[in-house]
Amino acid sequence: MFALEKMGELDLKHINCSMRLLEWGKSLRIAVLALPFVAVSLSTAVLAQQLPAHVHGVARLELIAQGTELSVSLLSPLDNWVGFEHAPRNAAQKAAIEKAKSDIATKELIAFNPEALCKLKRAEFEPGLPKTHSHKGDVHAESEASWEFHCEQPDLLKELRLPLFKAYPRFAKIQAAAADADGQSAGTLTAKSPTLRLP
Ligand SMILES: [Zn+2]
C-alpha cells in the first residue's frame, strides 16, 4: 500500500494510482495494463477519499471506462452479500455464497443508461473468506466482485445505477468513483440515491 495522500508529483500520482488499481483483481488488472501510461486513472484525492475501512453496510466501487470496455470492481465486507463472514457452516450458508456468485454473473446488479448499449462480458466473485479458523470471534472477510462490460456506444454513457441495493439490502452506502478519458467523478450511493453521473 502506498501513502497515496502524500504523493505530490503528477507522474508519481499516475504511477501509484495504476499500481493501486493493480491490486484490484484480474479484470481490472487487464484493463489497466491495456491503458497507455497516464491514461485513465483516478486522482489521489479521489482514492484517498475512498480508502477502505471494514465497516458492515459500506462498500467501495470503482469504474474504469476505456473506449468500449468498462470494468467495475466492488470491494465489500462479505457480510453485505450473505450476512456472515466465516466459512459456511451449513447448507444454507453455502447456498447464500453460491447465490451471490450466481447473481453477480446473471442479475442486473450494476446498470447503465440504456443508450450506451452495455453488455456484461464477464463477472467474478471472490468471497474473501478467512483461510484459517479463528476462535477469537473477530473474523471478517473482505469480498471483491468484478464485472466487465462492452458498451457499443461509450459516448452515450451517462450514468451508473445500482439495482444492487434492492437485491442486497445489507448494502447501505457505496462510495463510488469513476474514471474515463473525459475525467473523473465520485459520489456516495445509497438505496435512495443509487445513481452516479459518469464523467
Ligand atoms: Zn466484517
Image (cartoon, grey):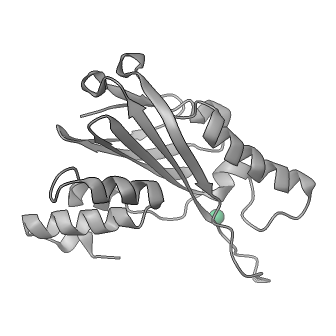
- Viewer-closest of 70 and 161: 70
Ligand 1 image-quadrant field: bottom right
Q: Can you see residue 57?
A: no
Q: Quadrant of the C terminus?
A: top left
- Residue 109 placement (x, y as % from top left): 57, 34
Is residue 138 left or right of 51 when viewed as pictured?
A: right
User: Of residues 78 and 15, which is closer to you in this image?
Assistant: 15
Most extreme residue toward the top is: 115
Identified at 36% across, 16% down, the residue is 115
Which residue is depicted at the point 76% across and 49% down?
A: 98
Place of residue 137 in the rendered image (x, y in percent of width and height, measured from the top left): 76, 77
Residue 81 in view (yes/no): yes
Q: Position of residue 35 (x, y in %)?
A: 24, 53
Which picture quadrant has residue 44?
bottom left
Q: Is residue 195 above or below residue 31?
A: above
**Residue at the location (33% across, 67% down)?**
20
Residue 157 point in image, percent of width and height: 31, 26
Judged left or right of residue 191, residue 193 is left
Q: In the image, is 46 to the left or to the right of 63?
A: left
Q: Is residue 172 above or below residue 196?
A: below
Choose top left, top right, bottom left or bottom right for residue 48: bottom left
Q: Is residue 192 above or below residue 22?
A: above
Q: Quadrant of residue 172?
A: top right
Asked whether, in this view, residue 12 is left or right of residue 174, the answer is left
Quick one: 163 or 102, which is closer to the camera?
102
Residue at point 40% right, 34% down? 150
**Is 173 or 32 nearer to us in this picture?**
32
